[in-house]
Image (cartoon, grey):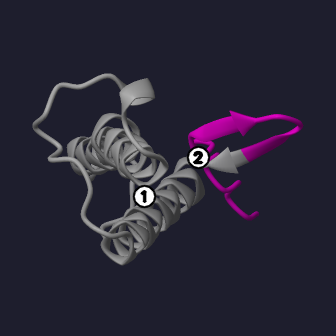
């Protein structure tokens, strides 16, 4: 008589909408998302470098008082510093902190 196979524990899952993803797949997707954000950050830096030098980013003048080029530069710098940069850091920190808890090594 054959011994029954012991039941294996189900893999942890990440729920996303209608589908459940194993944690390892969710972490792979988060890693790709962080890479995509880094690519976007580089693209924004490229755009910023093509604009003529306008106001010094350290000047504290109101956006409405700047010319269009300076406004564009200020907005790009703000998005990079306040949104994209922190998102990249948060994702990378989370991926590093959870490595070994179901997350694949990068």
Identify the residue at horizontal 52%, vertical 58% (top origin): 33
Mark toward the start of the polypeptide (2 vs 1): 2
Q: Which label number is shown at residue 34?
A: 1
Residue 4 position in % (x across, y down): 71, 54
Does dot 2 land on a helix, a strand or a loop?
loop
In this image, 67 relative to 81: left or right?
right
> Which one is closest to the eye, mark 2 or mark 1?
1
Q: Look at the numbered discs 2 and 1 and tell me whether their residues touch, using CB distance below 8 Å.
A: no
Residue situated in front as seen by the camera: 97 or 93: 93
Left or right, residue 55 beside residue 8: left
Q: Secondary structure at mark 1?
A: helix
Residue 86: percent from the left, percent from the top?
A: 30, 39
Residue denoted by label 2: 11
State the image coordinates of residue 80 (x, y, percent, origin top left).
34, 48
Q: Majority secondary structure of the magenta segment?
A: loop
Q: Quadrant of the C terminus?
A: bottom left
| Along the viewing direction, whichever of 38 and 5 lies nearer the viewer | 38
Q: Is residue 59 magenta?
A: no
Whether residue 5 is visible to the viewer of this picture, yes or no, is: yes
Residue at the outermost left position: 58
Q: Say which of 81 and 105 sits in front.
A: 81
- Residue at image location 34% in from the left, 39% down from the top: 78
Q: What is the crowding at mark 2: few (fewer than 14 residues within 10 Å), some, or many (at least 20)? A: few
Could you tell me residue 28's position as x and y percent?
A: 51, 63
Asked if residue 15 lies in the magenta stretch, the reply is: yes
The magenta-colored residue range is 1-20
Give the Cα separation between the discs numbered 2 and 1.
Answer: 24 Å
Residue at (24, 64) in percent of width and height: 53
């Amino acid at each position: 008589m054959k011994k029954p196979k012991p039941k294996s524990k189900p893999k942890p899952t990440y729920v996303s909408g209608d589908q459940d993803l194993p944690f390892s797949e969710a972490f792979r997707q988060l890693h790709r998302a962080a890479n995509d954000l880094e690519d976007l950050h580089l693209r924004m830096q490229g755009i910023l470098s093509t604009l003529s030098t306008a106001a010094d980013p350290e000047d504290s003048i109101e956006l409405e008082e700047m010319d269009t080029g300076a406004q564009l530069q200020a907005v790009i710098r703000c998005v990079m510093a306040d949104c994209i940069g922190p998102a990249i850091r948060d994702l990378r920190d989370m991926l590093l902190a959870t490595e070994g808890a179901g997350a694949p090594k990068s």
